[in-house]
Every structure is written in structure tokens, then in C-alpha cells.
Amino acid sequence: MVATQSSFDPHAVDLQTLTGCAAGGVAEARCDDAADVYDDAARGICDQLKKLDLGGGNHPTKRPAPAPAAPPSPSPAAPAPAAAAGAAPPAGPLPSLDLAGVAQLILSGRARNIVVMAGAGISVSAGIPDFRTPGTGLYSQLQRYRLPYPEAVFSIDFFRRDPKPFYTLAKELFPGGYAPTPAHFLLRLLSERGLLLRVFTQNIDGLEQLAGVPADRVVAAHGSFDSAHCIDCKRPASMYAVQAAVYDDGVCACDACGGLVKPDIVFFGEPLPARFHRRRAEDMPRADLLIVMGTSLVVQPFASMIGDVAPDVPRLLINRERVGHSRAAKALERRRREEEARRKLRACASGGGGGGSPSPSGASDEANNAAGTVSDDDAARPTAGAGADGIDSGCESDVSGSSDSSSGSGASGGFDFGLPHNARDAMHLGDADVAARQLAALLGWGDELKAAIAAGAQARAAAAAAEEEEKD
């Protein structure tokens, strides 16, 4: 599995992302694409022209006025125009390429087998800790172990040499310490209505089940804390023993051989669970709606799942950034950026200084959501880590929610945002919890979502009170 990623927050790689990276491995950093080179060249040449006074500025010695620049010849590969904001898509399964269009599809009864791909972005508001950011308590705790690099805590080879750092981290990650988010409760509502075929999650926080999604509907692609095994003899171990060792600041040993016991979270160098591959092969062809939430689609093989559904199946991306573009959509964006760079060069040479109308990428999120416009920031970013997208076990970050040999760099089966023929790929940029509330409201489930969230909070409060009584 090759990692290539959320859409990730470059300032704080969350734990779930790291677990996803561990499962997927770390992709090599990609070279800047041609558009970046054009942009850099344009800026550099403009600066030089200004210094030499060849760009229209004043100079002590008057120069002859330059001859008018010849009109540029049309580009042989001019990009096709993207759909206008709010424009209706070509005839297809969705009335509109946004949350409202997806809601109408569900309400029409034509989406009965919904598959959800979830990443760290749906757990952001749960407060999953970040152990890569200096100054955080967890980061400081791990520093005393002198890790060669933060992600080593999810390396199986490093774990064999020194399991203590992982057990320290596990104390912060163990299920029960965090509450499900509105996005998790939306999954529960889909399940209760018999609409959720499966949710494939990169997260190892177990919040889907805590929100009330049945365990058989959840596939933890990067493993979970539900079970544990000896890394030597492979025998299952008691999770009670593991939990006791974690909270006693110890390390759990195998009763049979004395080897190290590890929760079944996917580390670097380990394969993904067999259930992930089995359910992927069986469920994706059955899906009649795919919802991708809070993942940057950088970790393989998870990221490539968006291409597993049938060509006419609608897909919705809910994320803070545009990710997972198809090669055609990526090429369209690259050509647009090249044209913009050429325009800047021509403006500099003619004395315009490179000014002009802002790039389409500066459009508002609302317009981009409606039109499915491609952004300049979608390129896959190599990441490292273990487990889930925020606490995943493979390698994603953004606790919000991108891998490269796949959808991140523009892959077959990726999203066709911005392409004229796109009739099935909808996009909503923004916070996963806000989007969950909006989608629930469009479906007429707003009050039920609020009630589920409130009931969950009450149940957790009651459980905490009961636990305190037992301690007393």
C-alpha cells in the first residue's frame, strides 16, 4: 500500500493520519508539476524586468516605447471551461452537484446502499491529541524516549526494540476517552434507516461504534483497539490485560510465550486486515452512493476505493480541501495554471506588472461547492504515520481530512470536479460536522440528529458517574 495524502493539515499531523500512514507506507515526495514551474518562472522574470526597467517603470534615460505586443496565439490545448457556479450538471443521477442534490437522491429512494469512506476529519472536534506538535503534553511525554522520528512510535520494528513509547501513546488513544461527533451520529442515522451498507474508516478511535453504528457495519481499515495479539506467536491476548498494562504504565506480555502484545492497529510494515479487502470487494460494487468524509485520500489502498464504484454511481466529497482528482481533472487544472502564468509573463513584458483578475482558485467556497471547481492546493502530499486519518493507523493527517500513486495526483477513477462531463461527483468544502448537520437538515433529520447527540452525551455522563462511584 502506498501512501500519498488531507488533504492534510501541514501544521499538525494527527494521530489517526499517522496510523493510516503506517498501514499505507510513505510515498516519495512528488516533483512540482509544470504549473508550479510556470508560476515560479513568471514571478522571477517579472522581478528581473522590473529591476531592469523593462516592465514599464520610469528610468533616467528615456527609451523608445516598445512596440505593441502581438496578440497571443491561442493555446493548442486550451482548457475546457469549468461548470459555472450553480449550473445544473449534465443529465445524471444528481439534480445538483452539492449537498442538496445528494439529499434529493436519498429522499427519492434511489440510494439504498450507501458506502461511506471516513478519515480523521470526522474526529477533529472530538479532540484527538496530536503528538507531533511541540508544546503539547503528549509530544513532551514521548520526547523522553528519544524517538528517531515521531512516526517511529507506529513502526513494528521500533516496537520490537522498545514498546514503551507506543504504550504511552495508547494511554491517550484508548477508546472511551473521546466523544463521537455530529458526523459520527449522522452515520448512525443512516444505519438506523437501513441506508448504510458500510462505513470504511481510517480512524482507530472507535467513535463510529460509540455513536451507535453497529459493529458489523464498520470496517476499520487500519485496525482498532478491539483486539490484540502477540507479535511473536500470534496468539490472541486479553484486551483487559492490555488495558491494565496501558494504565499501569507497563507493557503487556504474552501469557504463552512471553512475547510482546500489541493491539490490532496496523503498523508500518504490516498488512491491512483481511476483512477490509473482503468487504471492499463485496461492498463497493453494490454501492449506489459513495460519501467520502474528512480524508485527504493519500493512503493506499484506501484512497483508490473511490474508483471501485460503478461509473454511474454518484459520489460526494465532504472535506476541507479538494482531493482525489481524476487525471483529466488534474490536467485541466494544470493547463489553467499554465495559461495564468503565461498571462502574467505577457503582462510583465508589456509593462502591466503582472496584475489582473484573480485566479479562479480564489473564488468563494460557496461557488466552488456549487461548481465543483478544482483548487491549486489539491496535490498529494507525502505523509508519515500509523493508523488512522487523525488517529488512523496508516498515514493521514488533516485531522480533517490526500496518497499519490492514486487519487491524490490525479488517478483513474478519481473525482471529475470541474470537468464539463461531470454529472455524478458532488463536493462540499468545509467542516465535516457542519456538513453533517446541513445534510441532516436537508433530509429532514435535523431534530433527530440533535436528539442523538444529546442522548449520547447523557449516556457518557452516566457512565462516567458510575465509574466514579465504583472507584469510591
Image (cartoon, grey):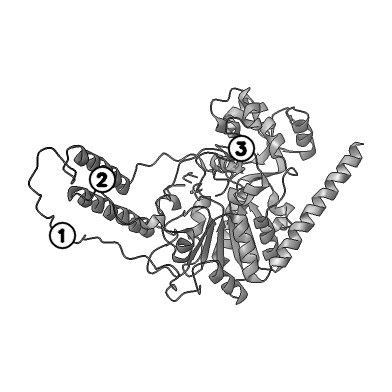
Measured as percent of width and height from the top left, residue 169 is found at 67, 33
How many marks overall?
Answer: 3
In space, the residues marked 1 and 3 are separated at their CA atoms by: 54 Å
Which amino acid is tagged 3?
Asp
Residue density around tag 1, few if under 14, some if 14–19, many if 20 or more, within 10 Å: few
* Tag 1 and tag 3, C-beta contact below 8 Å: no
The mark lying in front, picked from 3 and 2, is 2
Q: Nearer the viewer, mark 1 or mark 3?
A: 1
Percent x, y of residue 204: 65, 45
Callout 2 touching callout 1 (CB < 8 Å): no
**Residue 130, numbered circle:** 3
Q: Secondary structure under badge 3?
A: loop
Q: Distance between the residues labelled 3 and 2?
A: 38 Å
- If you read the primary sequence from the N terminus, does the residue marked by circle 1 or circle 3 appear first? 1
Q: Identify the residue position indicated by label 1 in the image.
A: 71
In the rendering, at what x and y percent does residue 178 appear?
72, 45
Amino acid bearing label 1: Pro
The amino acid sitting under disc 2 is Ala
Label number found at residue 42 = 2
Of 132 and 112, the residue lying toward us: 132
Determine the secondary structure under disc 2: helix
Q: Nearer the viewer, residue 122 or 289?
A: 122
Q: In this view, does 411 lie above or below 110?
A: above
315 or 154: nearer the viewer = 315
Residue 341 visible (yes or no): yes
Identify which residue, 287 or 402, lies in the foreground.
402
**Mark 3 or mark 2, which has the lower sequence index?**
2
Mark 2: few/some/many CA within 10 Å (<14, 14-19, 20+): many
Quarter of the figure that contains the C terminus: top right
Q: Which residue is drawn at 39% across and 55% down?
A: 361
Label 1, secondary structure: give it: loop
